[in-house]
Amino acid sequence: MGYVKGNAIAGHRFDSLDALRAHLAHWMREIADCRTHGTTGEPPLQRFERDERQRLKPAASKAPFLQVRELVRRVHTDACIEVDTNRYSVPWRLIGESVTVIVSDAVVRVLHAGREVASHAQSAARRVSVIDRSHLIGIVGAHLVGTTWLPRTAALPVANDMPAQLLRPLAEYEAALGGSW
């Protein structure tokens, strides 16, 4: 890095990142690869062509490195976590909890207490919400999410870890409050 900073960049000004990249490409091709190296006594390009090029093997079928990220996120009040400016839904019962997020192979996996609780295809777009509507059933107003409406009288599914008597149709809550959304 010191060689590049002191010999390729020092004393130059660049109007843009593209201008810097073009300058560095020219500098590497015409100057750095052609000069006599102080340690080997020969130009790096000549040594590469003679000793290294024929030993290289194609690696087209393999990724250059394992591309996996592990993150910790807190579930927001809308039952979503944020990853790379996008929002991904998780089951609403995890609101306020910390979850582990594994991003690999274009998949966003969400784990809570070591168990996978959600999985979404990673969005290539930015600032979008990727919502599994079943994650939101149980939140007041969840029937309004997305383009298809849930019936207000539909009973909520029974969760594995919650007694059935605690789950009620949203219409019961609306009736108790004297109105609707």
Image (tube, rainbow, N blue to C red):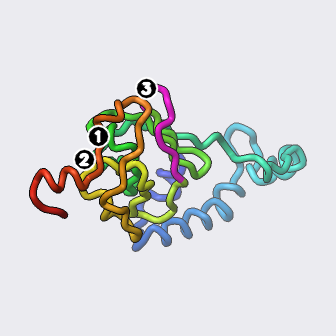
* Pointer 3 residue: 113
Q: Is residue 12 magenta?
A: no
User: Residue at horizontal 48%, vertical 26%?
Assistant: 114
87 or 13: which is nearer to us? 87
32 or 78: which is nearer to us? 78
Q: How many marks?
A: 3
33 or 84: which is nearer to us? 84
- What x and y, as percent, mark residue 178? 9, 58
Quarter of the figure that contains the C terminus: bottom left
Q: Amino acid at mark 1?
A: Ile
The residue positioned farthest toward the left in the image shown: 178
Instruction: Write the start and end of the magenta stretch as one range.
Output: 112-120
Tag 2 near tag 1, CB within 8 Å: yes
User: Residue at horizontal 41%, vertical 36%?
Assistant: 159
Mark 2: few, some, or many residues within 10 Å (few <14, many ≥20)?
few
Q: Amino acid at mark 2?
A: Thr
Residue 95 is labelled as 1
Would you say residue 83 is visible in this rendering? no
Would you say residue 155 is visible in this rendering? yes
* Pointer 2 residue: 77
Mark 3: few, some, or many residues within 10 Å (few <14, many ≥20)?
few
Residue 149 is labelled as none
Task: Give above or below for 107 relative to 25.
Answer: above
Lower position in the chain sequence, tag 2 or tag 1:
2
Tag 3 near tag 2, CB within 8 Å: no
- What x and y, as percent, mark residue 43? 75, 51
Q: Amino acid at mark 3?
A: Ala
Task: Give above or below for 133 relative to 63.
Answer: below
8 or 129: which is nearer to us? 129
Q: Which element is circle 2 on?
A: loop
Lower position in the chain sequence, tag 1 or tag 3:
1
